[in-house]
Image: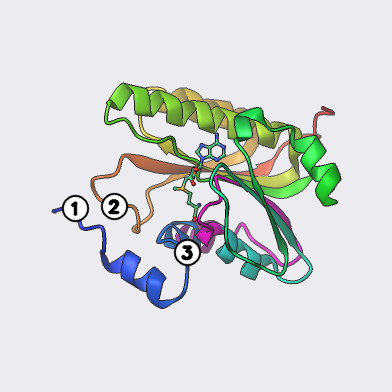
Amino acid sequence: MAYNPKDHYFKKAKKENFAARSIFKLEEIDQKLKIFRPGQMVLDLGAAPGSWSQYASARIGAGGRLLGVDITPIELSLPNATFISADLRDLNLEDVFREQGFAPVFDIVMSDMAPKTTGIKMTDQARSLELCELALETARKFLKPKGHFVCKLFQSEDFNAFRDQMKTMFDRVDVLKPKATRQISKEIFLTGLSRRGNVRPS
Ligand SMILES: C[S@@+](CC[C@H](N)C(=O)[O-])C[C@H]1O[C@@H](n2cnc3c(N)ncnc32)[C@H](O)[C@@H]1O
């Protein structure tokens, strides 16, 4: 099928006032795995332009809070969300939590982070994996026991090793390619449900 940047999901996102078509990927993951609940604390890594945050913000409601981080500034204003413009690789999240009044424990850590693609398959895959490892390390530090993790990965031969790392940390690991993912895209989403054990002191 030919690549169509303004496909069904693009138009649907525009019509429903979502910042990006990515919303429908998270919605499908949530509909299948039931990860969001009212009152949760959510850390959104790679949040710009903000459609995952819009979805999560509505699902967690007024009793929940969301912190979104992205290199690109996020223009959205959501009643229960705070956005930080920074490169996660250089960021001391504990300082941010302190400055923004967040306790350093989250019910959900989700990452839709993606590198700027170069077109060189191996480079793009390696950069995507680095971002996933950074997201998983962030979850290791700040995700509550029984909390959930969602992460986007460009599929590569390192996929199994990354999934196995997640399996050591979560009761259940699911791999999904949501319908809203473009057919030509190599991205897949891994979800870790119910973190085992205690949060490691950082
Ligand atoms: C596909 S977009 C995320 C879309 C978003 N989930 C939404 O629904 O609107 C990927 C984002 O990852 C961000 N990103 C990539 N590397 C990052 C890093 N090191 N630190 C923070 N954000 C990063 C990019 O700036 C980009 O905005």
- Most extreme residue toward the left, as rendered? 2
Q: Using the numbered discs, state the Cα–Cα distance from disc 2 to disc 1 in whole angstroms.
A: 8 Å
- Most extreme residue toward the bottom, as rendered? 15
Left or right for 6, reference 27: left
Quarter of the picture containing the C terminus is: top right
* Amino acid type, callout 1: Tyr
Q: Using the numbered discs, state the Cα–Cα distance from disc 3 to disc 1 in whole angstroms.
A: 20 Å
Q: Are marks 2 and 1 in contact (CB under 8 Å)?
A: yes
Q: Residue at x 85, y 51 (%)?
A: 101
Nearer the observer, 48 or 29: 48
Q: Is mark 3 within 8 Å of ligand 1?
A: yes
Q: Are marks 3 and 2 in contact (CB under 8 Å)?
A: no
- Which quarter of the figure has residue 201? top right
Q: Is residue 43 highlighted in magenta? A: yes
Disc 2 or disc 1, which is closer to the eye? 1
Say the numbered circle drawn on residue 182.
2
**Badge 2 or badge 1: first in the primary sequence:** 1
Left or right for 200, reference 72: right
Disc 3 or disc 1, which is closer to the eye? 3
Q: Is residue 179 highlighted in magenta? A: no
Say the numbered circle drawn on residue 21.
none
Nearer the observer, 82 or 65: 82
Say the numbered circle drawn on residue 3.
1
**Badge 3 or badge 2: first in the primary sequence:** 3
| Residue 159 drawn at (x, y percent) | 42, 28
Q: Residue at x 61, y 57 (%)?
A: 35
Q: In the rendered image, which residue does mark 3 sit on?
A: 19
